[in-house]
Image: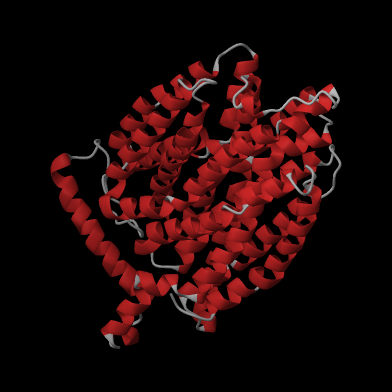
Amino acid sequence: MAGQGLSLHVATLLTGLLECLGFAGVLFGWASLVFVFKTEHYFKELCEPNAGLLSNATEQADCKGQDERFSLIFTLASFMNNFMTFPTGYIFDRFKTTVARLIAIFFYTSATLIIAFTSVDSALLLFLAMPTLTVGGILFLITNLQIGNLFGKHRSTIITLYNGAFDSSSAVFLIIKLLYEQGISIRASFLFLSACSVWHVGRTFLLMPRGHIPYPLPPTYSYGLCSEFGTRKEEKKTAECENVELQSKEVFSPKEESQDPGQQHELRSFQSCVLSRRFIWHFIWLSVIQLWHYLFIGTLNSLLTNLAGGDRVQVSAYINAFAITQFFGVLCAPWNGLLMDYLKQKYQKKTGKTGTSASAAALCSAVPSLALTSLLCLGFALCASVPVLSLQYATFILQVVSRSFLYGGNAAFLTLAFPSEHFGKLFGLVMALSAIVSLLQFPIFTLIKGPLQNDPFYQSMQKTKCTEMSITGVGLTIPSGALGEES
């Protein structure tokens, strides 16, 4: 029976990894898809021919309106990717896994069908399709993150692995671009993605729970249609009761239980988590770094066109290189989780000797991860600020490593720093709030195309200074604030 349970857990883990890798975060391969759309002449009417310019510079100078339109679509889609995590996180917490996944499948399939049947004349439908695609993708990620609960002490590693797979899924648009160059239409590619909804539905009912996967995992816990239907409901209720008891034992000592019950509830309430210094500093840290990543991805096509002097062959080659590096995010992210799991076990062994609480020991394991992520982003911003085309290869590598560390560390930190029953709402809220900050990318892009005369490097240097400030002001403050207060 234990062997069957392990096989089911491994099947759930691997299929969840494939789902995140192939579908969840495809938006961030936007540069590859923009190249295809430009080849298909989407929004070409916004280009204004200017006979006074050289032919290789015409597209750069005269298609400012086209670039702004694509940037606006990405801004809206990336905003929805983050902002909608709060309501979708609530849906996941309130209506459980099956309902959340069926909604995700509906959004994702609708979006891929819209893109498949979009043409030059109906290109404005991309404003509807891309945000809908991202909402479906983020719901896939949220419902899969709980799979880490099946693997106990490797929980953080699984969570960061899934976030890395989310980043790597941006390579899907590269595959679509390469297939397009080989003669396979964009319609055929997106119809195939739509057909994959059958697989998503099958996985929802066969390999995923109807409710939530509890943590710690009770010995009698079962899920999926492979388990007996008659006993599953009872086991589920038992598991939830055991989960509440185990969590209360972990968080509160006997002395604390004898204290004021109202104070205990307040400490564990969702409102107290949101208003804590720990959450506020984490939100600021995430927002600053995320804005820089979104701005880089949204302006990459224009930036490379500027550096390559309008040479489309070179631009295509560098976009391919960028998309290929994105695929390796799934290999980078688990190292962050392994580091956190190792440090967590190390600090927990010392709790008996030092007298510190288990929650403080868990938070200590997050400090090196947050600091390392900040340093990686600083290196990424510095490389992106140098106007040398060949140096962008290093920029691509640092970008994918820092981004995989950022989102994997974000999810893992929230599981360590706050009660698990609030994870869906807190994860959604911090992403929703950071989405509001990410809206700044479009006015910055307009600034680059306007007053800065298509030169993004002035903005890059300013952003590098902001990143340095975030490391000194946030990277060091988060841990100290985190350890100074209880969740």
Q: Is residue 18 visible?
A: no
Q: Is residue 397 above or below residue 468?
A: above
Q: Nearer the viewer, residue 343 or 433?
A: 433
Q: Is residue 271 visible?
A: yes
Q: Position of residue 315 (x, y in %)?
A: 76, 29
Q: Position of residue 239 (x, y in %)?
A: 25, 57
Q: Nearer the viewer, residue 476 or 233?
A: 476
Q: Give the side of residue 446 with respect to residue 254, left or right.
A: right
For the C terminus, which image quadrant?
bottom left
Q: Residue furthest top?
A: 183
What's the residue at 44%, 74% (across, down)?
275
For the N terminus, which image quadrant?
top left
Q: Position of residue 419 (x, y in %)?
A: 39, 67
What's the residue at 60%, 77% (across, down)?
480
What's the residue at 75%, 39% (across, down)?
303
Q: Quadrant of residue 5?
A: top left
What's the residue at 79%, 40% (across, down)?
392
Q: Quadrant of residue 69?
A: top right
Q: Is residue 144 above or below residue 14?
A: below
Q: Is residue 434 above or below residue 273?
A: above
Q: Nearer the viewer, residue 418 or 136?
A: 136
Q: Position of residue 134 (x, y in %)?
A: 47, 40
